[in-house]
Amino acid sequence: MKQVAATALILLLLLFLIPLLFFRGGSLLGGEEEEEIPVLTPAPSGPLDTETTITVSQPDGTVETMALGDYLWRVVAAEMPASFEEEALKAQTVAARTYAMRRMANPPAAHPDAAVCTDHTCCQAYITPESAASNWGDKAEYYTAKIKNAVSGTDGVVALYNGAYIDAVFFSSAAGRTVDAVEVWGNSVPYLTGVDSPEGEEVPNWHSTVTITAQEFKDTFLAAHLEADLSGEASGWFGTPEYNSAGGVSTIPVGGVTVKGTEMRALFSLRSVNFTVAVSGDEITFSVTGYGHGVGMSQYGANAMAKEGKTYQEILQWYYTEITLDTISDS
């Protein structure tokens, strides 16, 4: 009887202990300990970002005036993953501040009553603290403080070339190298020259594919280029591409028509111009590396440099060649 009672007691304990180990990430079922969220003390915006105000056109048509530091927090939270390294977030903040100051000096025709708007296709991406906190879940407090510290830690710092605010363009990820502005937009900009960029396989969707049928390709391409000859097998439609300095497609012959890689990217929703084309039967597949136009600062490259120990100043002066860094009180 004692053996039976002891066995019953052991079974009863296991029934209670196994669920506890499972839900608490215990080792019995191979679970992992929950990630501990660091604690950060948020620093308020510095005096330069607090004393400078900016007008922001809101989605409802109203114009809100706010401190530059508050605006920058909303931009950085929307433009760069808050999980990125602190120095990368600081580099993004300086780029955003430089953009904002440039717009304040020359408000766009789209909203002449405000320096910037919240539409990323017109100005910079923008998110409210409430929406950002909802996206971040249990890391909201930590990420909120992290971005506040990136803003306060670069109080008033802007990027200049020959004393003028630079066009601080940026993009998500490169395929090993950024591109000279003249190769993408046709205008040579001395501080937007191609440089090596260290990101790689750690970037989500760094390699991506787009596969469509030959008929879908034909319909889309002929809508833009009626003069193209897309008769016969799809394998015969494509000629040998010419490449830009970063290995992306500069131009490619398609059906006897030479088109820019940027147009192919737009027509077929490719993540970048670093693509190859393969035809298999009735399918055409684009294999793509990187994401974005490729000019200026690569965000994932900036994060990789920060992981290597580079400061935000070094990151900015790498991607924007021959610039200087100053504060808005002196620029």
Image (tube, rainbow, N blue to C red):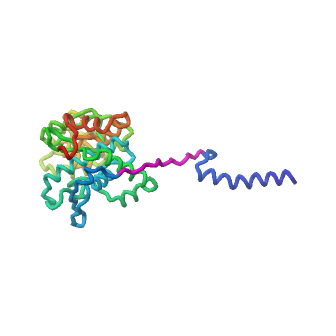
Rendered location of residue 21, percent (x, y): 63, 50
Rendered location of residue 93, percent (x, y): 28, 47
Report the magenta stretch's main SS. loop
Which quarter of the figure has residue 322? top left
| Frontmost residue, 153 versus 189 | 153
Asked whether residue 253 appears in the rendered view, the answer is no
| Frontmost residue, 192 versus 247 | 192
Classify 60 as above or below 19.
below
| Frontmost residue, 265 versus 16 | 16
Rendered location of residue 97, percent (x, y): 24, 48
Q: Residue at x 17, y 53 (%)?
A: 104
Q: Which residues are magenta?
A: 30-43
256 displayed left or right of 132: left
80 falls in the magenta region: no
As drawn, the residue found furthest toward the right would be: 1
Q: Residue at x 29, y 37 (%)?
A: 315
Classify 230 as above or below 311.
below
Classify 117 as above or below 173.
below
Asked whether residue 3 appears in the rendered view, the answer is yes
| Frontmost residue, 258 versus 317 | 317
Numbered-mark total: 0
267 displayed left or right of 162: right
Which quarter of the figure has residue 297? top left
Q: Quadrant of the C terminus?
A: top left
Q: Quadrant of the N terminus?
A: bottom right
33 falls in the magenta region: yes
Rendered location of residue 171, percent (x, y): 26, 44
